[in-house]
Image (cartoon, rainbow, N blue to C red):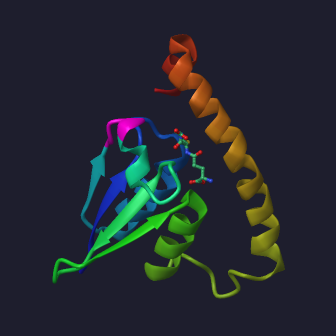
């Protein structure tokens, strides 16, 4: 069975669904908090979260973008309904996807403002 590294900041932010999916799946994962922004160039798009899947033979698969990570894990660990790409699910998906940039902006604000940061943690 694969194990995982979840790279993000030490807050829930955009990554809580990923951590929740990994917990629900009952798989082993480790949270890693990169030294930011120094390590940003090591990520696929200069942002977090990044998921690394590590197979028993040591090979790795790296995936960025919270939505892609969530869909990958949800599909892999069978949390998606049969009609997961149908009208009803994609209608919900359009709302959650729309909120992602807003949440990312709030997190950037929180990084710059201690009182906002306290509200997140
Ligand atoms: N579309 C990306 C957005 C990622 C994103 O903006 N992440 C923020 C944190 S929530 C980040 O890495 N901020 C630090 C930076 O951009 O330097 C996703 O959904 O994963």
- Residue 18 vs 82, above or below: the answer is above
Residue 119 vs 97, above or below: the answer is: above
What residue range appears in magenta? Answer: 33-38
Q: Position of residue 41 (x, y in %)?
A: 42, 49
Magenta segment includes 34:
yes
Residue 85 coordinates in the image, percent (x, y) = 72, 82
Can you see residue 119? Answer: no
Q: How many marks?
A: 0
Q: Residue furthest bottom?
A: 82
Where is residue 64? Give x, y as percent.
Answer: 49, 62
Residue 37 sits in quarter? top left
Image point 37% across, 70% down: which residue? 25
What secondary structure is the magenta-colored segment mainly?
loop
| Side of 79 where 29 appears, left or right | left
On the question of residue 14 being in view, the answer is: yes
Answer left or right for 57 relative to 82. left
């Amino acid at each position: 069975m694969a194990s995982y590294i979840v790279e993000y900041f030490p807050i829930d932010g955009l990554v809580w669904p990923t951590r929740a999916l990994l917990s629900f799946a009952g798989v082993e994962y480790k949270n890693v908090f990169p030294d930011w922004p120094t390590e940003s160039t090591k990520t696929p798009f200069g942002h977090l979260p990044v998921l690394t899947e590590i197979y028993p033979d040591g090979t790795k698969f790296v995936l960025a973008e919270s939505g892609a990570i969530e869909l990958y894990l949800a599909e892999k660990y069978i949390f998606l309904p049969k009609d997961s790409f149908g009208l009803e699910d994609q209608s919900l998906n359009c709302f959650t996807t729309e909120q992602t940039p807003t949440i990312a902006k709030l997190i950037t604000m929180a990084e710059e403002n201690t009182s906002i940061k306290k509200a997140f943690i």
